[in-house]
Image (cartoon, rainbow, N blue to C red):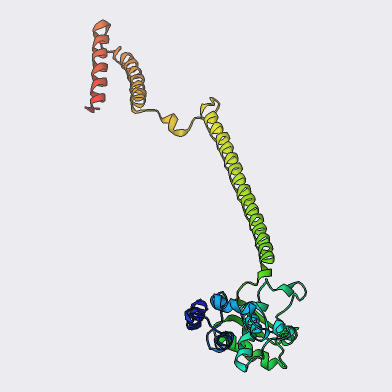
Amino acid sequence: MDQAQPKALAALQPFIIEATSTKSPSPRFLKELIIRATSTPGTYIFTELLQTPAIQSLQTAEAEYKSYLTLLETFSWGTYEEYNSTPGLPELTSVQTQKLRQLSLLSLASPFLPTQEEKPDTLNYPALLESLALSSNHELESLVTSAIYAGLLTARLSPTSTPPRVLITSVAPLRDLRPQSLPAMLQILKTWENRCTTTICGLESQIAAVRAGAAERTTLQRKRQEVVDAAVIQGENDSSKPVRPRDRRGNKRDLDERMEGEDDEDVSSDEVKMDVDDGGDVAGPVGRAAAGFGGRGTKRNRGRGGFT
């Protein structure tokens, strides 16, 4: 479908060359040119041909030839229903009829159709049968299928819905804008702009709310952490806190001093006993001296791991 417009423009180029290269073309020549252009397979867009000075010269031609200018305008932006409602237009061939009906499908799926407000649902089977002057659902389905295979639109038939509808999802850019469609187009674009603005404002509000919530949670978490840290520091500085077992053990020097003090107490008790026992054999200071000497020697030897 993306290549539909370039292909249609390429198919129209020979007729544009004829219209621009022919000097003083006659109305009859231009009539035949329009018939051939609208009947040739692959020609679905007619803007460049319609705007050539030669074709525009038909505005001042006789009514018989001027009607072909109106016919070309109908192929450019009109519908088959408009063709039937416009008096004095030339009769269409079967090929022209098929092509104009296919192009009408593109216009009926467009929001710029002037009758859009009067007929909101233009794509159901009854409305399409009336607009395209078809007599059966089979003819309508064949027409839609041919337009799909020609790359003019993307659609799906829904004959079991109520009412049956043609679900058109996209159309090729082959239709020209009719002059009176510009105000409607501007209004639609304005509505679209307002919707986009409203959506953006809503998204910005949600983003701001998420950021505010995240900042609030961060602040609350920081305050909680500060309370926990203060409680831990206060607990470490509290003198009433029980001493842990590792604090009771002390260091190695304290343990050695404590052990040495216990040894001194043991030695003092032994000296007293020796003084009492030796007092019956050795009298006087000599005995006490000997006893004291023996006690000190015993203490030194015990500390050195000597005799017992």
The reply to whether residue 148 is in sight is yes
The reply to whether residue 171 is in sight is no
Residue furthest to the top in view is 284
Observer-nearest of 153 and 34: 34
Q: 210 above or below 248? A: below
- In the rendered image, residue 185, in percent from the top left (x then y), is placed at 66, 66
Left or right: where 277 falls relative to 180: left
- The quarter holding residue 83 reads bottom right
Observer-nearest of 120 and 265: 120
- In the rendered image, residue 194, in percent from the top left (x then y), is placed at 67, 57
Observer-nearest of 95 and 21: 21
Q: Residue at x 50, y 80 (%)?
A: 16
Q: Residue at x 73, y 85 (%)?
A: 87
- In the rendered image, residue 176, in percent from the top left (x then y), is placed at 60, 74
Q: Residue at x 61, y 42 (%)?
A: 216
Q: Quadrant of the C terminus?
A: top left
- In the rendered image, residue 189, in percent from the top left (x then y), is placed at 65, 62
